[in-house]
Image (spheres, helix red, strand yellow):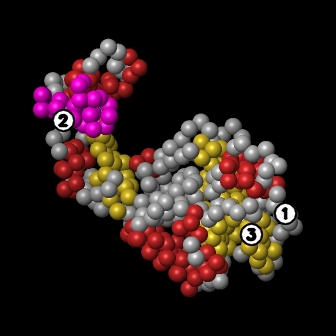
């Protein structure tokens, strides 16, 4: 049997205020064409289907569109919830969907549910583990010592009968790491030493009984520990640090005798995200301008701050999402000891010092008033400061 492994669709996501629904529809249509070309039997969707727990109408309609297209092709769907999803919303109608071979596991109920299939030469069991926290799992296994996400997942697998004679696939959404090595983050995820996006680390060795583990949560496609434990990565670039990444979808081929075969099929976005660097004159020179509809992150190397740089860029690149500077002023700022910069200084002194450092001149009274109002609204200072 052949499967496509997807994850982190984040339907409904925006990028610096730009709506990505059409970009997401474009990439889902591309995935459907791949499914047709490769004669896919099933699609594994490893969580973070939506970008928000309360998804927009456009996001829910887009998921509906994608699922209907898969059902029309008689392609099975195995979908679990991620930490961005609302369990109840994703689980709504799951019993009805199952009659059309759309299998959804959005809420852990004490059982690691599976679907079993017989292909020409293999018995295949597909297990679906929705995003879980230790507190929820502890309720179902009171005799287990469960203090962490790692403990929780290990307890679930320990209490699940797995027939090792079959080909066993797991679809899950957790932060899974290798021994002494963490996955490479794409930038869309916030990271701590033991967690990503407040999701604690889980050792990959707890999945030893599975022939393939379809993971979601990390946006860069990659293996964890062994080739058959993989993050699919997000189908689109959702952060500026992903500008140089290439997105793909994982094609998984399962047979009785051989190890699972994995092939990465490249995806081409409707609008790419590119990071360009140089002076304003260089970047907007006609000979250097290309693909003007792309999302552009520009780093300007001009020594002087350019008035309304965003407005100028958007005349050429209407989807410019970010502009920053790399010059002698910014490099000097990076070398400042931040821990000592606020010692015994008032708010106006701090702002004045920063302004002189960045722009080489004094801040005006009007600009200082704007900064003071913004700081008050943010709760940084009170009205007496």
140 with respect to 90 (left or right): right
Q: Secondary structure at mark 2?
A: helix
Does 115 appear above or below 197? below
Q: Which quadrant holds the N terminus?
A: bottom right
Residue linked to disc 3: 114
Q: Which quadrant holds the C terminus?
A: top left
Determine whether label 3 and label 2 are within 8 Å by CB.
Answer: no
Q: Point out the stretch of residues depicted in magenta.
A: 364-385
The mark that comes first in sequence, 2 or 1, is 1
Does 238 appear above or below 99? above
Q: Label 2 to label 1, Cα distance in Å?
A: 64 Å
Q: Secondary structure at mark 1?
A: loop
Q: Label 3 to label 1, Cα distance in Å?
A: 11 Å
Residue 330, x across and y down, in percent: 31, 29
Query: Is residue 369 something that shows in the picture?
Result: yes
Residue at position x 63%, y 44% in the image? 200
**369 drawn magenta:** yes
Mark carried by residue 370: 2
């Amino acid at each position: 049997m052949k499967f496509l492994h997807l994850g982190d669709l984040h339907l409904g996501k925006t990028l610096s205020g730009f709506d990505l629904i059409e970009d997401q529809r474009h990439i889902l249509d591309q995935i459907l064409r791949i499914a047709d070309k490769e004669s896919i039997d099933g699609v594994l969707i490893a969580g973070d289907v939506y970008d928000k727990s309360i998804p927009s109408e456009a996001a829910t309609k887009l998921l509906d569109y994608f699922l209907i297209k898969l059902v029309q092709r008689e392609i099975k769907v195995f979908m679990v919830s991620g930490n961005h999803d609302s369990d109840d919303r994703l689980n709504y109608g799951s019993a009805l969907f199952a009659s059309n071979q759309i299998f959804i596991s959005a809420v852990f109920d004490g059982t690691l549910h599976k679907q079993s299939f017989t292909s020409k030469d293999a018995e295949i069991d597909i297990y679906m583990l929705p995003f879980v926290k230790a507190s929820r799992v502890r309720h179902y296994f009171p005799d287990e010592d469960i203090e962490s996400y790692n403990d929780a997942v290990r307890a679930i697998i320990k209490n699940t009968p797995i027939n090792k004679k079959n080909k066993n696939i797991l679809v899950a959404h957790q932060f899974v790491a290798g021994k002494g090595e963490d996955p490479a983050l794409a930038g869309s995820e916030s990271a701590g030493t033991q967690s990503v996006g407040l999701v604690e680390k889980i050792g990959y060795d707890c999945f030893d009984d599975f022939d393939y583990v379809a993971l979601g949560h990390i946006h860069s496609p990659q293996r964890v520990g062994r080739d058959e434990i993989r993050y699919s990565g997000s189908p689109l670039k959702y952060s500026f640090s992903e500008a140089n990444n290439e997105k793909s979808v994982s094609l998984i081929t399962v047979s009785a005798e051989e190890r699972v075969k994995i092939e990465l099929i490249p995806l081409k976005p409707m609008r790419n995200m590119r990071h360009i660097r140089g002076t304003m004159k260089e970047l907007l020179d006609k000979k250097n301008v290309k693909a003007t509809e792309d999302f552009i992150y520009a780093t300007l190397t001009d020594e002087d701050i350019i008035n309304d740089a965003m407005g100028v860029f958007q005349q050429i690149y209407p989807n410019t999402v970010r502009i920053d500077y790399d010059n002698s002023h910014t490099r000097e700022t990076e070398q400042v000891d931040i821990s000592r910069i606020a010692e015994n200084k008032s708010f106006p002194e701090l702002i004045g010092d920063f302004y002189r450092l960045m722009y080489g001149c004094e801040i005006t009274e009007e600009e200082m008033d704007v900064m003071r109002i913004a700081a008050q609204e943010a709760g940084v200072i009170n009205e007496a400061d």
